[in-house]
Amino acid sequence: MKLVSSRFILSVGAVIVFSLSAQASYTAGNVKGNYSILMDAWTAATQTNSALLGMLTFDGVSVVTGFVTVVNSTGPQTYTIESGSTYTVQSSGSGSISLVTTEGTVPLDFVLNSVSAGVAQGLQLLYINPIGGNVVNAGTAIAMNLAGSASAATLKGNYSFLSNSWTADPSASQMGLVGTMMFNGAGKVAGSYTQEKDGVSSSSTFSGTYSVSSDGSGSMIITADENIQTIDFVLNSVVKSVADSLQFLAADSTMEDVSTGTAVRQ
């Protein structure tokens, strides 16, 4: 029988200790700056689906500010995140946010990911419903990395996109779209897409205009098959003054369904 060297045992133990001590430890300082946020809520209850789009600004210590736009069957409502909104981050990288608005406090749990240069490039979010109910609300926040003011030129080039529309009304149609859109950097957008609706696929094109505010939020007005639609968005992942992606939300107040999606620069 061969004896295991005590030197080998010591070395293995040292590796294990080193690996445990090398695990990252996170703080609120790892969640800092502006993030776009998109969350979808869905339920089996009739006509109660909704979605949220906005921008969160974390100070790297404990305070969060910004705005969110909520769309449901009654139309869009924009809320400013008010004083008293806070966040915390545990050493494991999980955390919580308390968003105070005129409609009440929104509690969120999150896990940070894609840490680069000490700052999380993304958060995965879950709404913690304090009153219960048959509804789930989840989504993502993505670091904007915007240096200076944004403009139409910050959104330029070809982008692939994926959009989902759904409703809790059993008599209405669920729908999904995948396609490409091209922004010219000066306020014009055009594209094409494939649509799946009621088990039937079809393809079409669209064109329209867009604008970008200095904070990186914006909107599009597009026409497709003679239908005009307003889409709100927030830019993120800005590299060399151009957004690599954006999160968007259909903001038409007359629609009873909810439509959200993401676009990524090709």
Image: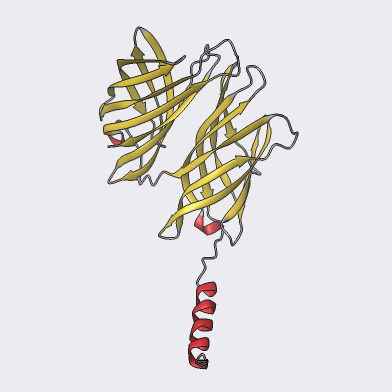
Quadrant assignment, res 150? top left
- The tally of labels here is 0
Residue sitting at x 50%, y 73%? 19
Quadrant assignment, res 212? top left
Residue sitting at x 65%, y 17%? 46
Question: In the image, residue 9 lies at what x, y percent?
Answer: 52, 87
Q: State the residue in front, 141 or 146.
A: 141
Report whether 4 appears left or right of 88.
left
The image shows residue 4, relative to residue 232, as above or below, that is below
Question: In the image, residue 42 lies at what x, y percent?
Answer: 60, 27
Q: Residue furthest top?
A: 226
Question: In the image, residue 23 lies at what x, y percent?
Answer: 52, 68
Q: State the residue in front, 191 or 103.
A: 191
Q: Residue furthest right?
A: 131
Q: Residue furthest front?
A: 1
The image shows residue 206, relative to residue 8, as above or below, that is above
Residue sitting at x 66%, y 44%? 84
Residue sitting at x 39%, y 47%? 145
Q: State the residue in front, 145 or 175.
A: 175
Q: How is the image coloured?
A: secondary structure
Question: In the image, residue 12 lies at what x, y percent?
Answer: 50, 82
Report whether 46 appears left or right of 238.
right
Name the image quarter holding the C terminus: top left
